[in-house]
Image: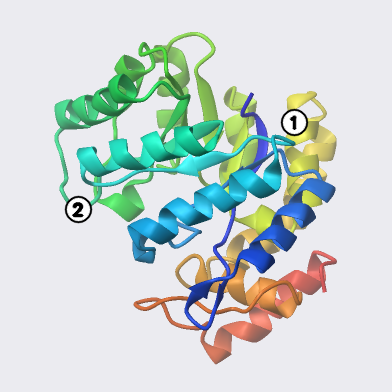
Amino acid sequence: MFSGSLVAIVTPFSNGKFNEKAMAELIEFHIKNGTNGIVPCGTTGESATLTAEEHARVIAVTVEIVRKRIPVIAGTGSNSTDEAIIFTKHAKAVGADGALLITPYYNKPTQEGLFRHFEAVAKAVDLPQILYNIPGRTGINMLPTTTARLSQIPSIVGIKEGSGSLQQVSEIIHGSKKGFLILSGDDPLTLPMMALGGKGVITVTANVAPTDMAGMVSAALKGDYEQARTLHYKLTPLFSALFLETNPIPVKAALAMMGKISEEVRLPLTPLADDCRPKLKEALQQAGIL
């Protein structure tokens, strides 16, 4: 249900407010160009600086615009278990197809704490849930043994794995329940993760290159690794350029260069530095986007 190229979509702003019209246009752009699912209110969607009301509105608007044409997986994670439950209940109520739940950040829970956090959300809300492990953002790495335990809970259907370790991916696949979904949380590692058994990616790059990201993942799923490699290397300059500064600063700047949205980000994020702009523009040109 959730395989393929799933875009971790940006939240467009205009004069400090959520720009619903721009969001609708971005979603139509993705559906037209082969994106397999929309993931609002993730890190790329600047969830950390959305108010609770804005968070709810972004998810509701996304569901309304998509109209079940492709899945919507709502970012509903928090470092407060109670808040994660509230966000996940709201996502279900407005019609999201699933939820993406990041490991609690800053708190640095134990592995048992991680297990109990996700178990509590799963018990509270009957909605397909994807775990999200990204230690570089959260300060905590969820170990494969913990993921394997969580994979036994019926409503926990998969993980977005962003540890950067292919060994960890192998251990998750080997130890988890059969059919447990593995999605890449690191665009450059999508293809090698799929070679190990992953089924796709929740991707930043698809914000600007939806057709090629979807094509790469589709080719890998079909076993056409020659075509998948061709697209991987075509996208490689973007994989680097979109992380010249903290995500989503570069991807919003890229979308602005494409004429899609304002590059407005919220503090403490700041606009892309001037010395990064030529490098980003060059990568977009190399990928045939500009």
At 40% from the left edge and 76% from the top edge, which residue is drawn?
A: 269
- Foreground of the two, 172 or 258: 258
Taking 9 as reference, is 154 above or below it? above
Taking 145 as reference, is 163 above or below it? below
Res 99 visible: no
| Disc 1 residue type (three-letter) | Ala
Taking 10 as reference, is 5 above or below it? above
Q: CA distance from mark 1 to mark 2?
A: 36 Å
Q: Secondary structure at mark 2?
A: loop
N-terminal-most mark, 1 or 2? 2
At 53% from the left edge and 48% from the top edge, which residue is drawn?
A: 60
Mark toward the viewer: 1 or 2: 2
At 74% from the left edge and 44% from the top edge, which residue is drawn?
A: 35
> Which image quarter: residue 172?
top left
Left or right: residue 140 compared with residue 155? left
Left or right: residue 137 compared with residue 180? left
At 46% from the left edge and 34% from the top edge, which residue is drawn?
A: 93
Using the image, tell me which numbered label, if any, was put on residue 220. Answer: 1
Q: Position of residue 163 (x, y in %)?
A: 40, 42
Res 104 visible: yes
Q: Position of residue 16 (x, y in %)?
A: 47, 79
Using the image, tell me which numbered label, if any, was put on residue 106. Answer: 2
Quadrant where the C terminus is found in the figure: bottom right
Left or right: residue 188 compared with residue 287? left
- Foreground of the two, 14 or 170: 14
Q: Position of residue 213 (x, y in %)?
A: 73, 47
> Which image quarter: residue 168?
top left
| Disc 2 residue type (three-letter) | Tyr
Q: Position of residue 268 (x, y in %)?
A: 34, 77
